[in-house]
């Protein structure tokens, strides 16, 4: 396998890095202050973000995550392998993803709509997201049931004439408080009597529909940020029947397909997050002395640096390999690799950011470095898009299914 980036990718890397240097890094302090403060969802305070988005779009640095775009859909249609090194650059500054229209939950929603929307739904819901005129939210997780098992979801979606009526309570619906959030994609049950994986359906709910009641914005590790994580009650919410994605009963399959590409995006950005954490760790070690020595001259710290470098490089190879498998044989066939990279990458950043925080001492816990934000994000990634344990189970099942015990047992050396 060739890990050399193509000329096209090298050029794009330069362009993305240049955009970051020119337009994003200089606004980083401003964004952090707005995003964590009381004006975090204020359209005026966020106007500079939309301006930057439109600038990136003008420069063609737009929808880079999305393969298979149609002619009337803006973007380059890069493959997963081409996108991976670009996402690594963006990963260093989490809010930069939205500037290039490559941020969750919109990416997953765009992929989902690309795969499941009919022409009318494409015009109404997908194109505004692809154009950057709107953002969206994905509303699956519920406080009352273990939502890592999507078959547990309780929200009801009932047909009534030309409409569906939705009732239920969701939480951690990320981005629902963003001023440009136009709609939520809601997972619920249309037929609780159907077979286990055919009970669920997915429906688009415009945010201004009567009965959509946002109860609270849930802080993560006591911090708030733009878009938030909403607890939301759907109280007799009526939407046109034409908002249903696919057929009744397709919801579980659509949800599974949605989460695949998102996991490789996590993997790619985690490499950039971990690289930044390591760079900061090394920089701090070179300027700080304790007990008469620079920190990197203490053996225990040196080991932390070395381990971090080895773990990052291992993870990068697995990301690139996974992206290639997805490009060559498709998301479904790359299930095992996608599950592996989701775990490896989220654990990688937790480990490296944790070490970097430790080496920064008290400063590592403050908002003066990006480390606390990187750690928080990585910690979320071990739970979001399916907790790591669920993926570990899936990998083990595939490994057992694919194994050939008779072949392995030939190597036994004990008595017959
Ligand atoms: C910051 C953040 C943002 C989020 N954004 C969204 C969003 O936009 N939309 C959305 O719908 N959801 C979102 N989520 C929710 C996330 O997807 C769920 O939290 C996740 O799927 C787990 O569901 P749960 O919280 O109900 O945990 P549960 O299902 O209750 O699981 C709890 C724990 O049980 C263990 N466990 C579960 N299954 C197994 C198993 N098979 N084997 C071993 N152990 C197991 C794991 O340790 C797991 O963490 C977000 C979460 C966070 C923290």
Image (tube, rainbow, N blue to C red):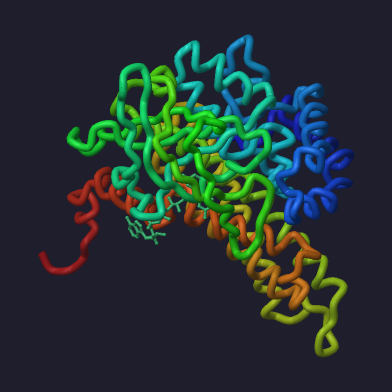
Residue located at (63% from left, 38% from top): 103
Q: Nearer the viewer, residue 259 or 34?
A: 34
All told, the count of numbered labels is 0
Q: Nearer the viewer, residue 249 or 388?
A: 249
Q: Is residue 351 above or below residue 261?
A: below
Q: Is residue 184 above or below residue 67?
A: below
Position of 323 compared to 223: left or right? left
Residue reaching furthest to the left:
416
Q: Position of residue 132 (x, y in %)?
A: 69, 26
Q: Residue 90 occupies which quadrant of the picture?
A: top right
Q: Position of residue 284 (x, y in %)?
A: 81, 70
Q: Position of residue 181 (x, y in %)?
A: 62, 34
Q: Is residue 286 above or below residue 41?
A: below
Q: Nearer the viewer, residue 13 or 168?
A: 168
Residue located at (21% from left, 62% from top): 412
Position of 350 compared to 170: left or right? right
Using the rendered image of the protein, determine whether residue 89 is visible from the camera's viewpoint. Answer: no
């Amino acid at each position: 396998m060739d890990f050399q980036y193509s000329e096209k990718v090298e050029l794009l890397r330069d362009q993305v890095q240049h955009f970051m240097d020119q337009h994003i890094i200089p606004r980083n302090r401003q964004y952090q202050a707005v995003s964590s403060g009381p004006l975090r969802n204020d359209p005026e305070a966020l106007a500079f973000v939309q301006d930057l988005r439109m600038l990136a779009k003008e420069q063609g640095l737009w929808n880079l995550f999305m393969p298979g775009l149609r002619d009337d859909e803006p973007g380059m249609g890069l493959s997963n392998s081409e996108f991976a090194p670009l996402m690594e650059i963006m990963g260093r500054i989490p809010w930069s993803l939205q500037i290039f229209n490559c941020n969750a939950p919109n990416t997953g929603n765009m992929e989902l709509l690309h795969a499941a929307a009919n022409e009318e739904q494409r015009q109404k819901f997908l194109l505004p997201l692809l154009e950057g005129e709107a953002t969206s939210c994905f509303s699956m997780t519920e406080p009352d049931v273990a939502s890592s098992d999507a078959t547990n979801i309780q929200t009801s979606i009932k047909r009534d004439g030309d409409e569906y009526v939705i009732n239920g309570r969701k939480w951690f619906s990320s981005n629902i408080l963003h001023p440009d959030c136009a709609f939520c994609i809601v997972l619920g049950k249309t037929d609780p009597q159907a077979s286990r994986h055919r009970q669920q359906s997915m429906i688009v709910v415009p945010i201004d529909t009567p009965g959509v009641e946002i109860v609270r914005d849930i802080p993560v590790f006591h911090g708030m940020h733009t878009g938030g994580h909403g607890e939301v009650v759907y109280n007799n919410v009526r939407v046109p029947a034409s908002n249903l994605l696919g057929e009744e009963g397709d919801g579980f399959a659509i949800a599974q397909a949605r989460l695949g590409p998102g996991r490789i995006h996590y993997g790619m950005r985690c490499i950039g997050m971990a690289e930044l954490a390591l760079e900061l760790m090394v920089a701090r070690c070179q300027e700080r002395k304790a007990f008469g020595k620079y920190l990197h001259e203490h053996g225990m710290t040196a080991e932390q640096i070395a381990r971090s470098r080895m773990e990052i490089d291992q993870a990068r190879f697995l990301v690139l390999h996974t992206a290639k498998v997805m490009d060559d044989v498709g998301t479904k066939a790359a299930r095992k690799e996608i599950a592996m990279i989701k775990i490896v990458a989220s654990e990688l950043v937790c480990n490296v950011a944790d070490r970097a925080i430790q080496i920064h001492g008290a400063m590592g816990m403050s908002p003066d470095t990006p480390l606390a934000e990187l750690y928080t994000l990585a910690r979320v990634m071990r739970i979001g898009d399916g907790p790591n344990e669920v993926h570990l189970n899936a990998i083990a099942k595939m490994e057992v299914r694919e194994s050939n015990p008779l072949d392995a047992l030939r190597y036994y050396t004990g008595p017959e």
